[in-house]
Amino acid sequence: MKYSLFALILLFVQTLNISDNVLLTLDGKSLGSVNREEFQSILGDTVMDVEKVDEFIEKLDQKVRKEPINARIDQYGAIVPEQLGYKLDRIKFREAFYQYYFGQGSATIALPKSPLYPKVDSELLANLRVKQIAIYTTYFNSRKKGRVQNIKLAAEAINNHVVFPGETFSFNQVVGQRTFEKGYLPAPVIIKGRVYRDFGGGICQVSSTLFNAVDRAGVQIVQRYSHSKRVPYVPPGRDAQVSWYGADFMFKNIHNQPILIQAKVYGGAISVSILSSEVIEIKPRDVPNAPEEALL
């Protein structure tokens, strides 16, 4: 990460009384400096404007924060270890800043950090990959390049996602908005019984494949909508329509163990597997298989 005099801190920086500035550093690198006069209240020079300080700390945290990265299983089946993240330790920074503010002269504050731990670590993944509790596969026309690209991107988004007991999975939240900047391409979509072209066309096959896989795994379906027109990649009534500004597919893990989603695209097929630990207690459901003809 590169650090510079970022714009948000410059809101607080003036060239007033440079000798009284406090220099802010992170991991030995300078982030810039601010002056105590920028935080004085209109009530007087000796009164601190706490709201300005709170706003400043919020901006600092946004610049300092590094999100943790969950462990994952790569394409070869190996576990890629998790990475710790960190955030601004607001309590320690506030103490140091108050000492500077109510003191005299200049100062240097090395921004204190506190760790952010990933939700999924290597040990958890190793325990969850031992038992496949459900799998579902659907098929598509691999010559439809835009649609295939969208299916691959959505499959990558849900792959390696862990749903903990009592937690609700939202397809739209996990996959995010389907945009050109993310690599999604225009492809046919069904809206109110008619076929249009839109970015992300084809991802409903991913959500539908996921729906059938988790339904086999005995989860609680929280929200699911069928298309207004029959889709050929799943049996009638077994689809799960999704759209960024509308329908979502959601389910709740009602089991006693976390479940792991593994999504893989190969040739003209997408396969979603649901895995968990040996001690999971489930009542699997009977779900009809998808037709093997690649109709789309």
Image (cartoon, rainbow, N blue to C red):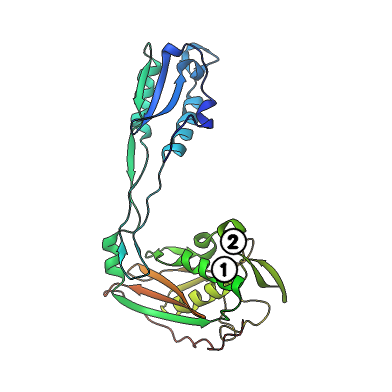
Image quadrant where residue 11 sits: top right
Query: In this rendering, which labeled residue sits more in front, label 1 or label 2?
Result: 1
What is the three-letter code of the residue carrying label 1? Answer: Asn
Q: Secondary structure at mark 2?
A: loop
In the picture, the disc for residue 178 is 2
Image quadrant where residue 191 sits: bottom right
Residue at screen point 35% across, 21% down? 108
Residue contact at pointers 1 and 2, CB within 8 angstroms: yes
Picture coordinates of residue 8, whole percent (x, y): 53, 31
Q: Who is closer to the viewer here, 259 or 47?
A: 259
Image quadrant where residue 242 sits: bottom right
Residue at screen point 29% across, 63% down? 124
* Residue 8 falls left or right of residue 196: left
Picture coordinates of residue 240, whole percent (x, y): 57, 74
User: Is residue 241 shown to the viewer in this render?
Assistant: no
What is the three-letter code of the residue carrying label 2? Answer: Arg
- At label 1, counting other C-alpha atoms closer than 10 Å, the crowd grade (few under 14, some 14-19, many 20 or more) is many
